């Protein structure tokens, strides 16, 4: 819940600071102003945040099913929350696990159903209107679909291509995927994916109910092979007039068909509308390497690596990389057009549960949120646990 209060004295102070820096700006001065705005905004935007560990045992690896701490994970990374049955699906190497509301962990897609060395890179679930099927994409450039079938499911290999490419056209006629780090399902039934090697988002237009009857089409991002991971070259725009940075690791969609991209090397969360218009949800300052809260015109991020959106698109949760300055990874939320707030990881801290100002994360493998945004799930790939963040 948010409470808003700002004194006239603070407004006067802020006006004086802005006037004093109007003629001459520097990184240090901007950071000072941003710090003041950050403190003020955090005073204005109070969230009641609680972090708890709901599944797995800290630092203990395995593949055991069970309740809560009795369960074991091998390599928990990307996740998606299915609001139809209130189940969290967790990718765990080459298998998929499920976690219900009582923290019971079960193996949903068992070992051996796909190539034993083909790690799952991302997963998403289609909207209810399209049947609620799971799509997941793998390291060897494959795309699979899981359709619910009573108490079981039907697994279909949509695309199976080891060789990488960025080609358009009919499925399985060319090489469409090349390190596909993100997958998202649109409300129109299309499946969108991000090719990290090319910095592009393409989508599959399924022209019939047959799983192989689809065409890959361009959507957003100028194909590039020579950017070398350098930040500062990003460009907002429509379709191929926009560019993305190297190292994009995650992508998601809201209920309106908008996509959100964790643009790691550009330190941004990018939004892509159904028409392919790409915008940045807060500002960019090249190479600052810090997280700064505040209005979107002032907020900054350091290495955005995971992203998850509420159904209405009014809250976009994302995580930032924690190695700069030996800080813990941070869970943050951007309200498009309004502000950015750090929920967990505001200060360097040890790993642990508790309120948002004291809890800390280890290396994050993925995040997922419920439709209303009141709960965010975080997987810790090194610590082998699933964390739950409740937000009020």
Image (cartoon, rainbow, N blue to C red):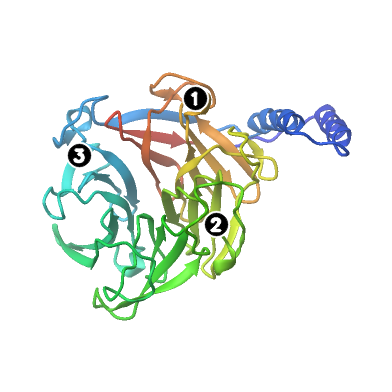
x, y percent for residue 210: 24, 78
The residue pinned by badge 1 equals 327
Residue 17, above or below 338: above
Q: Distance between the residues labelled 3 and 1?
A: 30 Å
Does residue 344 lie above or below 352 as drawn? below
Picture coordinates of residue 321, whole percent (x, y):
47, 35
Residue that mark 3 sits on: 105
The CA distance from mark 1 to mark 2 is 27 Å
**Could you tell me which residue is drawn at 48 percent across and 27 percent down?**
356
In this picture, residue 108 sits left or right of residue 379: left
Kind of element beneath mark 2: strand
Q: Considering the numbered disc 3 on the image, is that residue within a helix, a strand or a loop? A: strand
- Give the image quarter of residue 156: bottom left
| Residue in the picture at 72% in, 33% down | 27
Specify the farthest residue to the top.
350
- Residue at the (15%, 49%) spot, across then down: 116
């Amino acid at each position: 819940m948010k409470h808003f209060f700002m004194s006239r004295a603070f407004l006067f102070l802020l006006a004086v600071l802005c006037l004093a820096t109007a003629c001459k700006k520097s990184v240090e001065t901007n950071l000072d102003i941003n710090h003041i705005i950050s403190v003020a905004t955090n005073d204005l935007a109070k969230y009641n945040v609680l972090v708890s560990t709901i599944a797995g045992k800290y630092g203990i690896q395995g593949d055991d099913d069970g309740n809560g701490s009795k369960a074991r994970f091998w390599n928990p990374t990307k996740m998606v929350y299915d609001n139809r049955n209130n189940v969290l699906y967790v990718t765990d190497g080459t298998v998929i696990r499920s976690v219900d509301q009582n923290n019971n962990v079960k193996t949903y897609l068992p070992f051996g159903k796909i190539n034993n060395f083909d790690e799952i890179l991302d997963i998403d679930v289609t909207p209810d209107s399209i049947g609620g099927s799971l799509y997941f994409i793998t390291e060897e450039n494959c795309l699979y679909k899981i359709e619910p079938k009573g108490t079981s499911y039907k697994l279909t290999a949509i695309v199976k291509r080891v060789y990488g490419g960025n080609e358009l056209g009919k499925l399985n006629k060319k090489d469409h995927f090349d390190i596909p780090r993100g997958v998202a399902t649109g409300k129109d039934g299309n499946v969108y994916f991000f090719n990290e090697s090319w910095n592009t988002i393409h989508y599959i237009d399924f022209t019939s109910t047959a799983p192989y009857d689809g065409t890959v089409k361009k959507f957003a991002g100028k194909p590039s092979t020579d950017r070398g991971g350098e930040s500062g070259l990003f460009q907002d725009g429509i379709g191929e007039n926009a560019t993305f940075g190297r190292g994009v690791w995650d992508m998601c969609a809201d209920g309106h068909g908008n996509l959100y991209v964790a643009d790691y090397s550009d330190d941004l969360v990018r939004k892509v509308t159904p028409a392919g218009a790409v915008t940045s949800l807060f500002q960019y300052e090249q190479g600052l390497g810090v997280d700064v809260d505040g209005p979107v015109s002032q907020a900054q991020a350091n290495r955005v690596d995971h992203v998850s959106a509420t159904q209405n698109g009014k809250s976009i949760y994302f995580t930032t990389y924690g190695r700069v300055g030996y800080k813990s990874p941070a869970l943050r939320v951007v309200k498009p057009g309004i502000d950015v707030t750090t929920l967990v990881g505001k200060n360097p801290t040890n790993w642990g549960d508790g309120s948002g100002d004291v809890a800390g994360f280890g290396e994050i493998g993925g995040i997922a949120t419920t439709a209303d945004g009141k709960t965010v799930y975080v997987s810790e790939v090194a610590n082998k646990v699933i964390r739950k963040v409740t937000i009020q």
